[in-house]
Each structure stands twice: as structure tokens, then as C-alpha cells.
Amino acid sequence: MSTYVYGITAASDVSSLPEELGGVGEPARPVRVLTASGLAAVVSDAPEGLRPKRRDLLAHQAVLSEVGGAGGCVLPMRFGSVAPDDDAVTGVLTERAEHYRERLEALEGRVEYNVKGSHDEDAVLHRVMAENPEIRGMAEANRRAGGGSYEDKIRLGEMVAAAVQAREAEDAREVVHALEPLAAAVSDGPPSTGWLVNTSFLVDREAAEEFVTAVERARKDLPHLDLRVNGPLPPYSFVEPGPAEPASTTVGADAGAE
């Protein structure tokens, strides 16, 4: 039976779990603790054919919340992390004990906020036109010419697209620049269609309110952007892969995903 891994913590921080705590699967698999080298992995049996359904995503998150609620730090594994068996888990805990202890110390008292941003199409086009006199002049010339020739339309479209792309890069830098001073670490997420920025910030719990306030300030300073913040989350983006390889059914979702 393969082993589903929820997270890793210090063995002293998770002596026992509530009997009623259920993990992923239908019916929910009982959650248990494996220990080695002073570390603990919170695990359950892995169900067959696991998919990132809402119930299982929430179960994954609930287990991490229960373990972290005791006050200790937890290194969260992403949804779908599965090891061949319990021995494989304890073996890697032993093999990488120094690394996990370093990560637990670095992440103690910190949470993750993920910030995504996209352009409001009408607003960014208005800004591009306002900032670029050459584009404005060509658009006006085309208008006076009844729309302009096919070649003129193509050229205008290319110029607008290039200006929007440049604005996307500049706005992404500006968002990160505004929020980075409030974070202990920053991690860029994978490129995603529709988002010009997809960045996670590691934030001290005590600074969480200040960080959210800074996001609101960025929204006001950049009204042509749609900024979305998700958090506080376990620090998924700041933990290297643990004692498990993603199951073949994993689609890359994590329990904190929007």
C-alpha cells in the first residue's frame, strides 16, 4: 500500500492526532504519524485513483491545519504527494534530516501569501494610448482615413500588443517591488495564461496584516490591474520536494489553490 504524505514536522510537535481526523479518500483514510531522526511525517494510506476533488483538497488542508494548530511549524507537501510505502518515507526523513530541520527553522512563524495580477483590458489600453504618442498618432491617422489600410491596421495592432506586453512586465516588477520588503522570501510561480504576475511571498505571521494592507495599496496605485491575494497558506512554495514523488494522478494542484 502506497503512503500519502501531508507534511513534515518535528516529532516533538506532533505526539498524537485526534482519532476523528480523516485524510484524503472516500471513505477518509485514517491519518497517522511516522517518526525518524527526531522528525515526523503525517501520512495516511493513499487511495487509488486520487484526483484533486474539492473534498480531498479540503481534507489535505484540514490535516495540515490540525498539525500546525498545535503551534509547531509544518513543512506542507503538495496535494498528491505519494511514497511507495512507510519505509520509503522514514528512509528519506533520515537521509534528509538536516535539510528538513533547516527548513523547519527557516519557516517557523511564517505563512505564504500568493498574489496574482492581470490587466483590466480597457484600462490598460487606455493607459498604453496615454503613454505612447506614436500609437496615439497612428490611431488618429487611421481614424481620419476611415480606419486605415490593412497594413496600417496590422502595424497599429502590433504596436499596441508590444506596448501592452512591455506594460505587463513593468507592472509585474512594480507589484513585486511594492510587496517584497514585507516578505522574508519570494517565489515566482509557473507562468499561467491570463496572469502577468503569479508570485508567492513568505511573510511573518506578525506582519500578515501589514502585507495585506500593502496589497490594497498596490490595488489603488495600479488601478488598471486586477490583483488577487490568497492566504495565509502553509508555505508550499518554500519547501523543496519531500519524501514522496507526486502520484501519477496528480495534476499539480495544491490544497491552497484558488
Image (tube, rainbow, N blue to C red):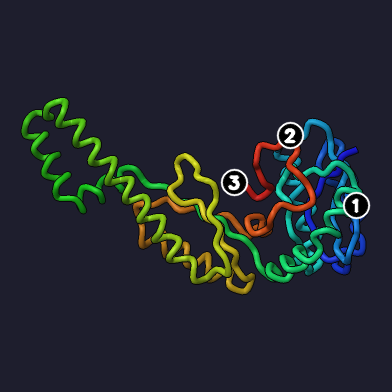
The furthest residue to the left = 144
* Mark 3 or mark 1, earlier in chain: 1
Marks 3 and 1 sit apart, C-alpha to C-alpha, by 28 Å
Q: Where is mark 2, residue-wise?
A: 248
> Residue 8, position in %: x, y?
80, 58
Position above or below: 118 against 212? above
Q: Are marks 2 and 1 in contact (CB under 8 Å)?
A: no
Quarter holding the N terminus? top right
Q: Secondary structure at mark 3?
A: loop
Q: Give the labeled residue for mark 1.
A: 32
Q: Amino acid at mark 3?
A: Glu
Task: Tell me the element at label 1.
Answer: strand
Q: Amino acid at mark 1?
A: Arg
Kindly report the distance in space between the C-alpha atoms of the residues bearing marks 2 and 1. Answer: 23 Å
Q: Nearer the viewer, mark 3 or mark 1?
A: 1
Please name the residue shown 55% across and 50% down the image.
189
